[in-house]
Amino acid sequence: MNAPILVLTLLLFQATPPPPPSSPVLAPLSASELAPGIRLFDTGRFAEARAFFEPYAVSHPKSAAAAFYMGRIALDLKEPEKAVEWLEKAVDLDAGNSDLHRWLARAYGVAASGANQVAQGRYAREAKTELDKALRLDPKNLRAREDLVNFYLHSPEFLGGSVERARQEAEIMRKQDPVAGRMMLANVHFNQREPELAEKEYKTAVEEKPKDIRPRMALGFLYQTQKRWDAAFESFEGARRTDPESWESLYQIGRTAAFSGERLDRGEECLRQYLAHTPTGDEPPLAGAWFRLGMVAQQRGDTAAARKHYQTSLELDPSNQDVRAALERLSGAN
């Protein structure tokens, strides 16, 4: 992967371990008549959501909300060119909406992965322009500033990359939201191969805001990447105790068990609880939970259960090549 592709892809799929910090959700765009389609989208039923929004978008060509959701659906269905087309339309219809500019920047990032080298550079410049517009419209849009930090971190200098600018933007975030800012400062440290300083930022954030689960979750992700399994378990369990409604922490306890082979009973318990839940927003899909449950079964040596869980995962998400590979390895071992 050459540099421009890497730059833009990382706007969506960061190289750093923690998830993005929370920030205000997308400003309300829609009337109540769109609520059924939004529910479909929020629960990951993207094909059904498209079937709802597409005719609406045709009959309501001035609806920025319909164009936005069509763009988001295209992103989730891995159709970046369509996503760019729809999100550009949404921005044209509602140019004053900061989040629309942010999502258009992300669409440019994903579209770059299949573009030629000249187009990659153009997409990079357009993504940066859209992030700048998003922040001019709403300087407190933490998600947009977060993406800008990652743009500066992962872009080559000729496209505007700068570690110092990334650090400056993270400091601005820290003044607006101390936890989010420290998490992005940790991302800067991680990018500079300073994991011990990243860990320190997360721990400081936990001390400053003990009831905020974001830095606890981020610590857990960091420990997962370092295979410090006991520390990962304790971070995610701490997040769960802090917020008993955190479904992500349940999933991550199960994921840690799946990769480590440790605390398998607890991992299975958490994954089964998660599977009784309907994920929304950025929560891991049920297909992922079935995959991790299969890994837990395989860690136990129960290949029949592992195969069953992998097959269930594939039924929910046939495009997941990791699950398909896991099934093939099981077949090859027998």
Image (cartoon, grey):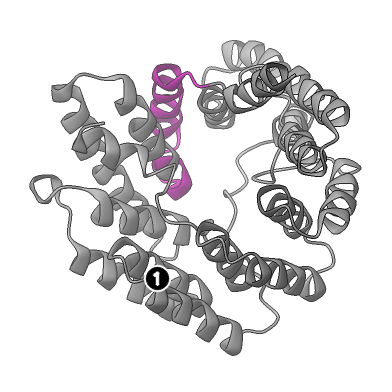
Which quarter of the figure is the C terminus placed in? top right
The answer to whether residue 70 of the structure is visible from this angle is yes
Which quarter of the figure is the N terminus placed in? top left
Task: Please provide percent x and percent y for residue 2.
Answer: 20, 32
Q: Is residue 48 left or right of residue 126?
A: right
Q: Is residue 114 above or below residue 175?
A: above
Q: Is residue 50 above or below residue 16?
A: above
Residue at (64% x, 66% y) in the render: 232
Q: Nearer the viewer, residue 16 or 228?
A: 228
Residue at (32% x, 59% y) in the render: 149
How many badges with numbers are in the image? 1
Task: Please provide percent x and percent y for residue 313.
Answer: 76, 26
- Residue on which the image places disc 1: 195
User: Is residue 99 part of the magenta span, yes or no?
Assistant: yes
Q: Tell me the element at label 1.
A: helix
Q: Is residue 137 left or right of residue 317?
A: left
Task: Please provide percent x and percent y for residue 180.
Answer: 49, 70
- Amino acid beneath label 1: Pro
Q: Is residue 131 left or right of residue 326?
A: left
The main secondary structure of the magenta stretch is helix
User: Is residue 75 part of the magenta span, yes or no?
Assistant: no
The answer to whether residue 136 of the structure is visible from this angle is no
Magenta segment, which residues? 78-101
Residue at (69% x, 46% y) in the render: 283
Query: Neighbour class for label 1 at 10 Å: few (<14), some, many (≥20)?
Result: some
